Amino acid sequence: MTRKILIADDEQHILETVAAYLRQEGYQVVTARNGSEAVYSFRHEQPDLVILDVMMPEMDGWQAARLIRKDSSVPLLFLTARIDDADQITGLELGADEYIAKPFSPRVVVAKVRALLRRAYGELAQEPQIWRVGDLELNAESRRVTVGGQPIDLTPSEFGILQTLIARPGRVFTRMELLDAVQGEAYAGYERTIDVHVKNLRLKIEPDPRTPRYIETVYGVGYRLRTADE
């Protein structure tokens, strides 16, 4: 089941970045630019989780949370530029489940969202631990990769790249996205290291690395894992 996330923040770049990361993980995302829009979207979209910036025009995050909490116990995460005791107490009294202080990594937001969804909805929010495409299989829990039943030894970076690709077969990932997936943060200038990792990964999992069966280069963009029926 696809979970729906509502994000409200008056900073456009934050709104767009967090929304992009959540959509990449398969979530449906609804956005709002202030507290009033957030309450309206909440009532009409019925999201499974709400992310609210504290300081917003027209209606701040505190007021929006009060109105939302009158109708629902939906998981609620606050984004805030400051996180002192008074703010935390106010948020807890309003029923906040998590706080994230700005500036933050979008990956931290994604991790918090996953945890809150698991806590609120149990198994419905859990992600698969085993992925298979053709003869290729990756087990995230045991960190085991096999091709045709034969185990393949991968470095942590190689495993992280393959897990990112196999979790969304057919989706094209940029080098920066893959670098962010394996390092936690992506830095321009280091993205070409992904090419080296992919080259080594192909040598280990491809029957013929010169004609890849699994990892396809999308020129000018990045890489993707071919789907089983291609």
Image (cartoon, rainbow, N blue to C red):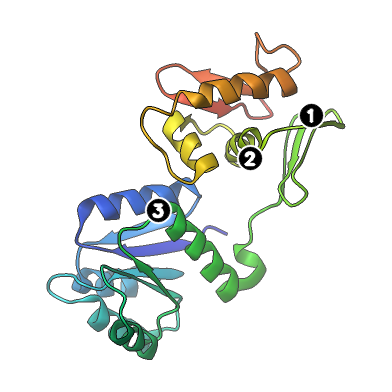
- The kind of residue tagged 3 is Pro
Q: Residues within 10 Å of mark 2 (few under 14, many from 20)?
A: many
Corner quadrant of residue 1: bottom right
Quadrant of the drawing holding the C terminus: top right
Q: Residues within 10 Å of mark 1 (few under 14, many from 20)?
A: few
Query: Residue 163's mark?
Result: 2
Q: Are marks 1 and 2 in contact (CB under 8 Å)?
A: no
Q: CA distance from mark 1 to mark 2?
A: 15 Å
Q: Secondary structure at mark 2?
A: helix
The answer to whether residue 6 is above or below residue 36 is: above
Which circle's residue, 2 or 3, is located before the other in the chain? 3
With 90 as the anchor, is 113 left or right in this view? right
Q: Residues within 10 Å of mark 3 (few under 14, many from 20)?
A: some
Q: Along the line of sight, which residue is nearer the eye, 71 or 57?
A: 57
Q: CA distance from mark 2 to mark 3?
A: 19 Å
Query: Residue 106's mark?
Result: 3
Query: Residue 135's mark?
Result: 1
Q: Position of residue 144 (x, y in %)?
A: 78, 41
Q: Position of residue 32 (x, y in %)?
A: 25, 63
Which circle's residue, 1 or 3, is located before the other in the chain? 3
The answer to whether residue 12 is above or below residue 96 is: above
- The kind of residue tagged 1 is Asp
Question: What residue is shown at x 20% (from left), y 57% (from top)?
Answer: 11
